[in-house]
Amino acid sequence: MEKRVRVVVQAADHLSLAGLTSFLGSRPEIALVGVDRWAGADVAVAAVGALSEEVVAGLRRSAASTGVPVVLVLDEIGEADVMTAVECRVVAVLPRAGATGDRVLRSVLAAASGGGVMPPTMVAELLDHVRRLQRQLVAPSSERGRLTGREVEVLRLMADGLDTAEIATTLSYSERTIKNVFYGITSRLNLRNRPHAVAYALRKGVI
């Protein structure tokens, strides 16, 4: 008999945890291990609503300390999540709506063999991100530091003390769009947080 894949399961809610452990635990290819043995697992399966700061911090710690590949079941997948997921050793992403037992199993087995499963949209976004980085590397520094009109509007409202929801309402965008705009600013210009981004815009004289 082939060696079974050791899998650790973690979920943000009891229903997801019960469903994943029940299905994977019934498979002869899988040997479930407890979360206290995460470092000894071959693959980790994590089911969360979104890549919140807390979730990302946990995934980063796991990636740094154990290097265990992660299969992520996620309610929402945004553009800003693509690189974050890759940096956190996530090798497979499944939208919760389409995360059938068989798909989770295939993703786990692929992860255990060194492969991965990404939705086509995420692959496209990842390639777009790489292309943007390549363009930035060859662009003059003045071009890299230039803010778009929408970015200026977002930073101006941040400087006025509005939160993400208020900015989205004011500009008639979704909150996710505003978050993506801000992520684009901070990642492109190597800015740490809101105050740093606002200070940058003030120094540039654009707000």
Image (cartoon, grey):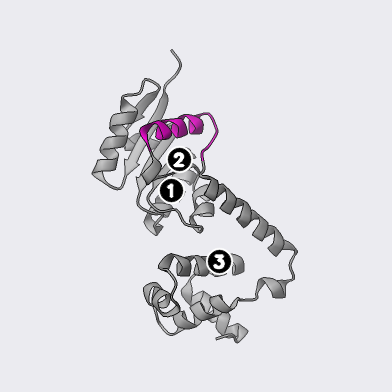
The type of residue carrying mark 2 is Val
The type of residue carrying mark 1 is Leu
Q: Are marks 2 and 1 in contact (CB under 8 Å)?
A: yes
User: Which residue shows up at 41% across the image and 80% down it?
Assistant: 170
Q: Earlier in the sequence, mark 1 or mark 3?
A: 1
Q: Are marks 3 and 2 in contact (CB under 8 Å)?
A: no
The stretch in magenta equals 100-117
Residue 142: quadrant of the picture: bottom right
Q: Earlier in the sequence, mark 3 or mark 2?
A: 2
Q: Secondary structure at mark 2?
A: strand
User: Which residue shows up at 51% across the image and 39% down it?
Assistant: 117
Task: Please tell me whether residue 197 belongs to the stretch shown in magenta.
Answer: no
Residue 44: quadrant of the picture: top left
Other-residue count near label 2 (Cα within 10 Å), few / some / many at <14 / 14–19 / ≥20? many
Residue 182 lies, with reference to residue 207, above or below; the image says above
Mark 2 or 1, closer to the camera: 2
Q: Quadrant of the N terminus?
A: top left
- Disc sitting over residue 122 in the figure: none
- Disc sitting over residue 184 in the figure: 3
Whole-percent x and y of residue 149? Answer: 58, 79
Whole-percent x and y of residue 72? Answer: 42, 43
The type of residue carrying mark 3 is Gly
Where does label 1 land, which residue?
A: 59
Using the image as rendered, state which of residue 123 and residue 45 is in the foreground.
123
Q: Secondary structure at mark 3?
A: helix
Lateral position of residue 13 relative to residue 167, left or right: left
Where does label 2 land, which residue?
A: 70
